[in-house]
């Protein structure tokens, strides 16, 4: 026993200096720079005047001037209505998919995933093709069927109601997933007890199922409110042509000529604080445990038999999904192969010229695709590496202050993309780090925005791997980083690849931060699509949009498959 006990001590001495802690602290410093630096500069500019003196006049101007107050009220109304619509649509759909015998339930879930891969700004452009007052395909169909005058229209997407509709289309999937997952996890014991006591299916749903799912509904409403409040692309495409602003578009406009950076900073801080409060509220709601199950294995929920209403239910679900999926995708496909984007494709006007123009004549395409690919690969690689190390530190409590690192890793979730873009602009347009005009500033933005989701996924993966293998490696003399690299990381490789894929997709979709930081030489795919929309080249947008959808769909499917395969490592029970 003496010999066996002395072996580990000799092995550790022979290893010498352990560089793990300095390297881990270096990653912590990187995390602080990514998050604290832009927010600090944002606060500095918000409370200083043009001469650098402290002032609160910037906030007074925002409150007193209707040009700033109106966008704030518009944003609040927009977010409130969107949240209400999302809950009203997503809650019944989640119940139908999780608790009834509605046909094609898995197909409905898959189509909701398709809504996730569609960037909201691309969905807004697709609805321009469908519901523009004069040229929209649906309005043309309306005039043809009713014989209405050429200046009459059924839909006007360039309106407040049109903006609420489009944002709701691409926000309701978040609410649907929360509610459907909550219902999937809710055991069927209480519902079975209600049925045994003679209650009908609808009474049980109203008195048992709905109260159990209510926290998820409230959390979904907060998520929808937050998404609607912080979006830039859809309001920029639909609201500004209609003559009104939201907070995000107003912040962007303050950087146009003549720039007013101090007002942009002052307008960004309330948006940031409100986002933090909403996320805190969501965490409190989801953290509630109003009900607990005592006993053994929970029973599977008993599906509600819809009878003759089964096909009506699936028809209503498909009508809902037509808004974010079927109709927009049809509009993009039609514009891609039609000589005129606003005309239905037919034998006479079918063309491949749009594809040829985008890939062989449009000079910006090569640069944009190259920039997007480089940034996607670098951001996914760096972001995954940082998330891997930080989640290891927090899961294993490897350094003092690990809880602070966990907080910093999740903090960017409270930073809207447009606000982060403003903070990074202030941080890297002056010495010693003049990064504006380079891909580096976009890389920092993408890594920062991707960090919360990447960290949370990796931390969940670490919790599923027992630390005993790492402890054995440490006893034999390995450092923490060596144990992480040679023992733990291989066990989590499917999770690592899945996180890499999700970050890559996020880079392709991101517009809010990129629109604040790009230059002519650092333009990315999302910004090019936005610029082409301003010039009215809808055919080229459709080609690039379909390319974006194909790439992101393939990567999301790969990541989902890898996540399912790696959801429970083989060594989790060791």
Image (cartoon, rainbow, N blue to C red):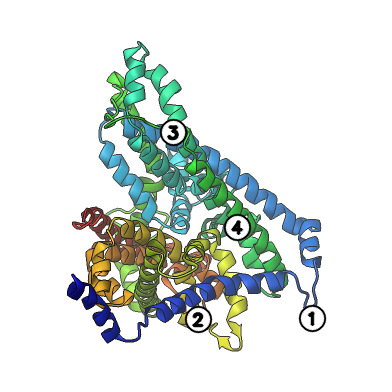
Which residue in the structure is indicated by mark 3?
213
- Find out whether the residues at labels 3 and 2 contact each other: C-beta distance under 8 Å: no
Viewer-closest of 243 and 88: 88
Viewer-closest of 258 and 347: 258
Tell me how far mark 3 sits from mark 2, CA to CA: 49 Å
Image depth: mark 1 or mark 3 in front: 3
Placement of the N terminus among the 4 image quadrants: bottom left
Image depth: mark 3 or mark 2 in front: 3
Q: Which mark is residue 520?
A: 2
Residue 82 picture quarter:
top right
Q: Residue furthest top?
A: 198
Residue 374 picture quarter:
bottom left
Tell me how far mark 1 sits from mark 4, CA to CA: 35 Å
Q: Is residue 427 visible?
A: yes
N-terminal label among 1 and 3? 1
Tell me how far mark 2 sits from mark 4, CA to CA: 24 Å
N-terminal label among 1 and 2? 1
């Amino acid at each position: 026993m003496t010999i066996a006990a002395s072996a580990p001590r000799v092995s550790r001495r022979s290893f010498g200096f352990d560089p793990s802690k300095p390297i881990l602290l270096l990653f912590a410093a990187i995390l602080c720079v990514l998050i604290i630096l832009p927010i600090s500069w944002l606060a500095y500019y918000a409370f200083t005047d043009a001469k650098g003196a402290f002032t609160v006049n910037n906030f007074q101007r925002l409150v007193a001037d209707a040009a700033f107050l109106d966008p704030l009220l518009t944003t609040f109304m927009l977010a409130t209505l969107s949240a209400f619509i999302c809950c009203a649509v997503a809650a019944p759909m989640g119940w139908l998919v999780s608790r009834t015998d509605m046909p094609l339930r898995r197909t409905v879930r898959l189509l909701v995933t398709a809504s996730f891969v569609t960037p909201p700004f691309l969905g807004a452009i697709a609805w321009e093709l469908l519901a523009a007052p004069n040229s929209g395909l649906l309005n043309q169909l309306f005039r043809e069927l009713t014989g209405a005058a050429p200046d009459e229209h059924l839909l006007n997407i360039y309106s407040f109601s049109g903006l609420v509709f489009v944002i709701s289309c691409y926000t309701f999937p978040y609410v649907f997933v929360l509610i459907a997952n909550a219902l999937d996890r809710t055991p069927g014991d209480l519902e079975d007890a209600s049925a045994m006591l003679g209650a009908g299916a609808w009474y049980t749903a109203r008195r048992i199922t709905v109260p159990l799912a209510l926290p998820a509904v409230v959390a979904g409403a907060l998520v929808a409110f937050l998404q609607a409040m912080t979006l830039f692309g859809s309001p920029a495409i639909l609201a500004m042509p209609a003559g009104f602003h939201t907070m995000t578009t107003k912040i962007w406009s303050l950087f146009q000529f003549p720039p007013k950076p101090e007002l942009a900073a002052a307008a960004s801080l309330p948006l940031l604080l409100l986002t933090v409060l909403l996320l805190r509220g969501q965490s409190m709601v989801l953290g509630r445990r109003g009900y607990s199950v005592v006993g053994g294995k929970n029973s599977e929920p008993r599906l509600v038999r819809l009878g003759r209403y089964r096909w009506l239910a699936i028809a209503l679900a498909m009508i809902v999904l037509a808004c974010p999926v079927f109709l927009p995708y049809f509009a993009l496909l039609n514009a891609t192969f039609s000589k005129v984007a606003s005309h239905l494709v037919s034998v006479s006007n079918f063309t491949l010229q749009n594809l040829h123009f985008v890939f062989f004549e449009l000079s910006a395409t090569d640069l944009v695709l190259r920039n997007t690919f480089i940034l996607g690969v670098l951001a996914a690689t760096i972001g995954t590496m940082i998330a891997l190390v930080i989640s290891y530190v927090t899961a294993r409590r490897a350094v003092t202050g690990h809880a602070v690192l966990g907080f910093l890793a999740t903090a960017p979730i409270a930073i809207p993309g447009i606000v982060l873009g403003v903070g990074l602009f202030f941080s890297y347009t002056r010495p010693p780090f003049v990064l504006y005009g380079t891909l580096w500033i976009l890389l920092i933005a993408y890594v920062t925005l991707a960090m919360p989701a990447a960290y949370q996924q990796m931390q969940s993966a670490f919790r599923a791997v027992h630390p005993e293998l790492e402890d054995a490696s440490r006893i034999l003399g390995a450092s923490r980083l060596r144990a992480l690299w040679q023992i733990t990381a291989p066990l989590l490789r499917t999770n690592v690849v899945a996180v890499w894929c999700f970050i890559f997709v996020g880079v392709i979709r991101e517009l809010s931060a990129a629109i604040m930081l790009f230059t002519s030489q650092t333009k990315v795919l999302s910004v090019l699509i936005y610029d082409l929309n301003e010039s009215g080249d809808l055919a080229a947008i459709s080609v690039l949009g379909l390319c974006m959808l194909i790439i992101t769909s393939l990567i999301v499917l790969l990541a989902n498959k890898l996540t399912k395969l790696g959801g429970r490592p083989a060594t989790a029970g060791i």
